[in-house]
Image: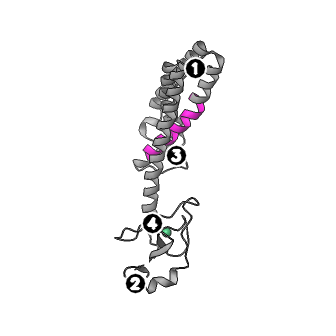
Amino acid sequence: MVRITRNDQPAAIKQYEHIKPAPTLGPLRCFAPFPSEVYTCTLSKGHSGPHVAHAVGAVVVAVWDREEGDDALREALRLQTDSLWIGIRLLLGCAVVLVLAAVLNLFLAGSLLIGSAMAFGWFIAGRSLHPLDRPKAATGGPSLVILGFWLVLFVSAVILAWIRAGWRAGVGAILLGFWVLPQLFRRFWLSRFASQGIRYPPL
Ligand SMILES: [Zn+2]
């Protein structure tokens, strides 16, 4: 059983001093928290051996054993960070589309496109889950209603863009509304589902 910090046992920690932290820009770090302390593991994700926390200058400040619950906790943290990033990316994506649409005088088409992608992303997110894991609304009738909702908004947006700004805008709207935006929304909805305790499929 290893659980030492530099403050408590400066001598004992010496034998771990050769262990280097994972590079900040390299593989994702482990981030397992030291029990009841502020340290988190600075080794790379999925490392072997005990957790090691480094301070600035790669100084080893804590070493502790891996434990059963570690991974679950880390998984929860990962989900949290993931869904935060997914949300940010989604907001950025929508903002870019709206700004672009406003510049091209296609604000309405852009809004419709985002609304349609929200519905379509939700639909494919539900489909990518195991049937038993799907939210109730993602099965049967309600999911067809959502699909119809998507189709109406999507087709209107494409036609609107096409009429107002030519075929290039139409094709752009198809690409954005059928592929780019729904993928962003799919990830977003999956992370929403996951926060409600549903198993998390690979994003
Ligand atoms: Zn670790």
Q: Is residue 131 above or below residue 1?
A: above
- Give the number of the mark in front: 1 or 3: 1
The boundaries of the magenta stretch are: 177-193
Image quadrant containing the N terminus: bottom left
- Amino acid tagged 4: Ala
Q: Residues within 10 Å of mark 1 (few under 14, many from 20)?
A: many
x, y percent for residue 176? 58, 29
Residue 189 among those drawn in magenta? yes
Q: Is residue 135 above or below residue 119?
A: below
Residue position for label 3: 130
x, y percent for residue 190? 48, 43
Separation of disc 1 and disc 3 at Cα?
A: 32 Å
Q: Nearer the viewer, residue 24 or 177?
A: 24
- Residue at disc 1, secondary structure: helix
Residue 147 in view in this figure: no
Separation of disc 2 and disc 3 at Cα?
A: 50 Å
- Amino acid tagged 3: His
N-terminal label among 1 and 3? 3
Residue position for label 4: 32
Residue position for label 1: 158
